[in-house]
Image: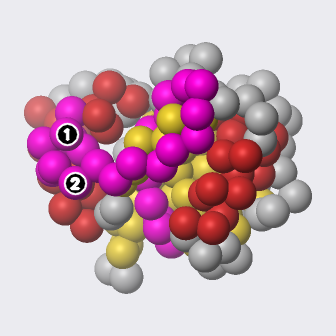
Amino acid sequence: CYLHASGIKIGDAGLLFIGHSGAGKSTMMKMLRGRGEILCDDRIILRRWPEGFRIHGTWSHGELPDVSPASAPLKAIIYLDQAAENRLLSVDNAKDRISSFLPFIIRPLLTADWWQKTLDLVEHVAREVPAYRLRFDLSGAAAELILDHFDL
């Protein structure tokens, strides 16, 4: 599926940052710039391969001109919330993971077949990929929090 999200490849790990416009997708890419390869700061492709989920860069950038045709195995989905503190909270409930994910799917020409495939993909993502809610301020400390948490 095609997502309103940003993504970065750090080593052999892909991190997917999801949030509405203004939530901080580009800001997180700026904080992590130089630590990995920015795939895109506004549109990411998520695809299920036999070996697991991968995120793929796209040409459709937002604020940052950095784009890459590279891909990476998806290590985690991180939902963004600007806050006065930096905290990374696990989203453990599958229903919460699904309901948080659905609004950020970019919908092409809608067909019953497309919906079925997409909902199937979302269900598998919710079960198989760790998800987190990142509450972060603009100090840049969130980048270190993420890198430390995921041993990157």
Q: Which of 3 and 36 is in front in this view?
A: 36
Q: In which quarter of the image is the C terminus?
A: bottom right
Residue pushed farthest top?
A: 22
Q: What residue type is labelled 1?
A: Asp
Q: What element carries label 2?
A: loop
Residue at 50 percent of width and 28 percent of height = 81
Horizontal side of 76 relative to 111 (left or right) equals right
The residue under the point 61% across, 57% down is: 146
Magenta part of the chain: 72-99
Label 2 near label 1: C-beta < 8 Å?
A: yes
Q: How far apart are marks 1 and 2 (CA)?
A: 8 Å
Residue 109 falls in image quadrant: top left
Look at the image and say whether residue 64 sits in the magenta stretch: no
- Tag on residue 92? 2
Q: Reply above or below: 40 against 72.
A: above
Residue 15's spot in the image, x, y percent?
55, 58
x%, y% of residue 148? Answer: 63, 67
